[in-house]
Image (cartoon, helix red, strand yellow):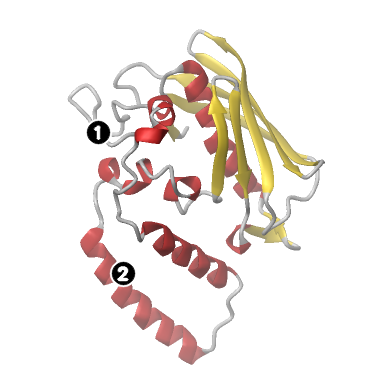
Amino acid sequence: MKEQSSGPALPSAEHHEGGFRPTSMADMVQAQASLDASRGGPHLGPFIEQVRTLMDRARLLSPSDDLALEAIATLEKLNDRLAEAVVEEWVAPTWTRGDLPARGNITLPPFTVERVDADGVEAELTFRTFHLGGNDAAHGGMVAMGFDDLMGMAAAVHAGAVTRTASLTVDYRSITPLRTPLRLRAWAERRDGRKVYVRATLHDGERLCAEASGLFIVLRSGQQ
């Protein structure tokens, strides 16, 4: 199961190691307009775009020996330099940078949330070359990842509380193209106690690429 929680605050005694921030995804979304988007600085977005471009290149790379050795040396130096700026999970800027695609999280397919409220989430999502499965189509696991994150957001906002994914089922209806703006919609169908049932669709224009259903669990304070 996966975390669906965000916020700049460090965990308190009641939020033990491995748990959640006191500020939930729902709180973050509701306070989006007032979030501090300066964490990580004004150049974080372009930096993340360069990292994504590197990932795209690496996905289809077949380097010569000389190029591979040159790249290894360059990346070793860069990784040593970047290590100086690594921070704890709880204060990483990707938890607050709602101004960046996918909150600046490079592990996610980049998306831009266009609407989020108690009725659901609508987002534009684009799978890049890095997300290739085969024949210029997105990998099914990457499609599931996009669903998971945005369905978790819909669950958290609907419940007004922190949630985790308990189950996720994806039905692939047609090819999901790369490098194409797609429309993802997620909404909570109902809540039964701590259980929030969520559905979602992914479209390329009028064509349904995939749809998903999931169960998300509202956590008690201090739960993982």
Q: Quadrant of the C terminus?
A: top left
Q: Residue at x 52, y 30 (%)?
A: 152
Residue, disc 2: 79
State the image quarter where residue 69 is shown.
Answer: bottom left
Pinpoint residue 4: horizontal percent, then vertical percent. Answer: 44, 32
Residue shown at the point (66%, 38%) measured from the top left: 184
Q: CA distance from mark 1 to mark 2?
A: 27 Å
- The amino acid marked with disc number 1 is Ala
Give the structural element (helix, strand or loop) at label 2: helix
Q: Is residue 59 left or right of residue 194?
A: right
- Which numbered disc, 1 or 2, marks the residue that appears first in the sequence? 1
Q: Residue furthest top?
A: 193
Q: Residue at x 35, y 82 (%)?
A: 73
Amino acid type at mark 2: Asn
Instruction: For residue 171, say whether it is visible.
Output: no
Number of other residues with Cα within 10 Å of mark 2, as a class: few under 14, some 14 to 19, many 20 or more: few
- State left or right for residue 139 relative to residue 174: left
Query: Would you say 91 lies left or right of 213 here?
Result: left
Residue behind mark 1? 9
In the figure, is residue 73 to the left or right of 191? left
In the picture as drawn, the residue positioned furthest to the front comes out as 33
Q: Nearer the viewer, mark 1 or mark 2?
A: 1
